[in-house]
Image (spheres, rainbow, N blue to C red):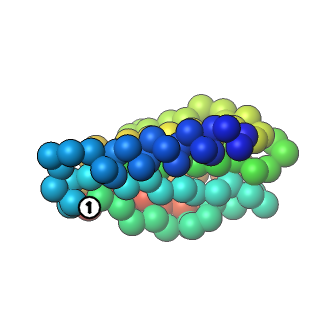
Amino acid sequence: MRFRAATLWIMAGLLLTAPGLPPHARPVMHTVVIEGTRFEPETLGIRSGDIVVWVNKDPFPHTVTAQAGEFDSKNIAPGKSWKYVARKRGVFPYICTLHPTMKATLRVE
């Protein structure tokens, strides 16, 4: 897990320092932690082109599934993560299909 986290930080650093990209066009990496059968943060606002990584810290699998079908992680095993590049603007409520009381919202500007 430490190697994976370090790799993600290095990749984010490379993306943020890519030459020729204006500061507003550089993708930013955001993290949503899945723990205690909750998504944290429950609402996340990002820009189009940004990257969101959901990290499952629970001892059982979860999904990240947009209610209107824009994205679906399938099962994220314990200790694993799933990455999504937000390309479409809008408000995207999502749930864990395995635990439907787990709800959150991704806002893409």
Residue located farthest toward the right when viewing the structure as drawn: 59
Question: Front-most of 83 and 75?
Answer: 83
- 78 left or right of 30 in image: right
Residue located farthest toward the top when viewing the structure as drawn: 74
Q: Quadrant of the N terminus?
A: top right
The local secondary structure at tag 1 comes to loop
Residue 95: percent from left, percent from top: 58, 51
Residue at 39 percent of width and 66 percent of height: 45
Residue 8 in view, yes or no: yes
Total marks shown come to 1
Residue 77: percent from left, percent from top: 73, 35
Residue at 42 percent of width and 49 percent of height: 13
- 79 left or right of 48 in image: right
Residue 102 in view, yes or no: no
Question: Front-most of 32 and 42?
Answer: 32
Residue at 79 percent of width and 50 percent of height: 58
Q: Amino acid at mark 1?
A: Glu
Residue at 31 percent of width and 50 percent of height: 17
Residue 32: percent from left, percent from top: 57, 57
Q: Which residue is mark 1?
A: 109
- 91 left or right of 71 in image: left
**Is 75 drawn above or below residue 31 in the view shown?**
above
Number of residues whose C-alpha sits closer than 10 Å to that of mark 1, classed few (under 14), some (14–19) or many (20 or more): some
- 80 left or right of 70 in image: right
Q: Quadrant of the C terminus?
A: bottom left
Residue 5: percent from left, percent from top: 62, 45
Question: Front-most of 23 and 47?
Answer: 23
